[in-house]
Amino acid sequence: MSNTNGNGKNPDSGGAAPLELKRGGFIAGYPPFEYLDLDTTGRMWEKPRFGLYVHLPYCRKRCTFCFYKVYTNRHLLPMEDYLAALHREIDMYGARPELKNRTVNTIYFGGGTPTTLSVEQMLALAAKLRENFTISPDVEWTVEGEPATLDPDKARTLREIGVTRLSIGVQSFNNALLDKNGRSHGVEHAFRAVEMARANKFPVINIDLMSGMIDETPETWDASLDTLIGIKPEHVSIYRMEVYKNTLLYAAGFTGPGVGGIPTDEMELVQWHHAVERLEAAGYTQVAGHAFILKPEHNHWQRVDNWSTGELLGMGVSSFSYLNGTVFQNSSKWDEYVGAAREGRSAVKRSTRLSSRGIMAREVVLGLKLFKLDRAAFKTRHGFDILELYGPRFDQLEHEGLLTISDEAIELTRRGRDYNDMICALFYLPEHNDKRFARFATEDELEDSSVLGLATMPIAIDALLAPVQAATPSD
């Protein structure tokens, strides 16, 4: 006699109906065809858009607080050799069938100082990208510029090749502070750069300032904000100064807040709040931990894509990419990068393939940098409500007044925005918790794969661009 309860289910099988083992139907696929949509047949031909990042690491001098991969000695590490390698790497990716029919919707020239390139070098690099990639006619194209390296010919050339967003690294409108903090330009150069940008009608001009610089006072900070608001750029970035081990400041003994004229955390937070209040009063909206815009169309779309679900292909020494569920990085050594490209090999040195859970964690960590997570969209992508994965942590942060939870979204509060990155780091997977801020490492340590937790090896491009395999959220 079968052991079933009154509704025909076997209590020993967790409430499931008893098995009936007999000749049955033939399964040819999954899910059943009845569940296929009738109105989305175009999806099978769609190719997602993606962004390009190009690292141009040369600078006139290294800023004392800079922790990026930059070079100042063009005799020891010639720019011409580097650009030749970069062109070869672009050709290698351009030949990949996986990328051939995909549209590039954002481009970013970062550094370093991209505006140290000559007009001829800029034209050649832009032509090389257009030769190899399908670039959208409405591409957002950003170039970082140091004010003293921009001249009328370069400004005009950048606009002619399609640059739509010029990001000018000013940091302060006080000459004494610029000199004290190791900048290579003066205030007059910043004004002239803005004039050239306006004359060439760049749709979006971004100006960088930095709160918490050495010897900054409430008076000098307010004066810089006065000047900034008077210029009224479409986008403003205010970076909060920190001292990392691989900087000239740290090497000179400036080990952190409260040391050598660097404002304490409390003093810097006052500066930061003052900037937010003044910018909002001037019509700006804060859209990320460091970013403010005048209008929605002035947002930085590569940032939005990269911190949500978009993909990015990085080229150049030390550049990072995210494609097909894989994070990978080029060699951060000049000779390894240039040598690989010269020999027609991939310059990728580190990579990690994310599990489904890893992809979800990445979306949470980076998505919170944009202040808001859409619960419905997350569930549509992954089949899980975000609270099923991180409910206790979100409850804790809500209790602390750092975010709010609604049926529609999870959103950082004003107080939460002050500690944006610290909150994001709480959602790292357990295996990444001890490496949350790898930039607190020396240059040599950053060369060590164990610091970043990435696999280290020469990596074939084929392996990186292969489709990611499905995995369960518990992976």
Image (cartoon, grey):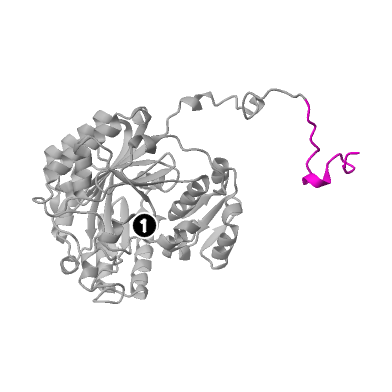
Horizontal side, residue 211 vs residue 369: left or right = left
Secondary structure mostly taken by the magenta-highlighted segment of the chain: loop
Q: Quadrant of residue 348?
A: top left
Horizontal side, residue 160 vs residue 356: left or right = left
Residue 173 versus residue 131: which sits nearer the camera? 131
Q: Quadrant of residue 395?
A: bottom right
Residue 224 position, x and y percent, is: 25, 64
- What kind of residue is marked 1? Ser
Residue 461 versus residue 32: which sits nearer the camera? 461
Residue bounds of the magenta highlight: 1-22
Residue 353 position, x and y percent, is: 43, 44
Residue 376 position, x and y percent, is: 57, 45
| Residue 206 seen by the camera | yes
- Residue 4 among those drawn in magenta: yes
The residue that appears at 54% across and 45% down in the rendered structure is 378
Residue 391 versus residue 326: which sits nearer the camera? 326
Residue extending farthest to the left is 75
Q: Residues within 10 Å of mark 1 (few under 14, many from 20)?
A: few
Image vertical order of residue 65 relative to residue 338, above or below: below
Horizontal side, residue 81 vs residue 399: left or right = left
Q: Which residue is mark 1?
A: 450
Residue extending farthest to the front is 1
| Residue 157 seen by the camera | no
Image vertical order of residue 457 relative to residue 443, above or below: above
- Residue 323 among those drawn in magenta: no
Q: How many badges with numbers are in the image?
A: 1
Residue 447 position, x and y percent, is: 28, 56
Image vertical order of residue 468 relative to residue 299, above or below: above
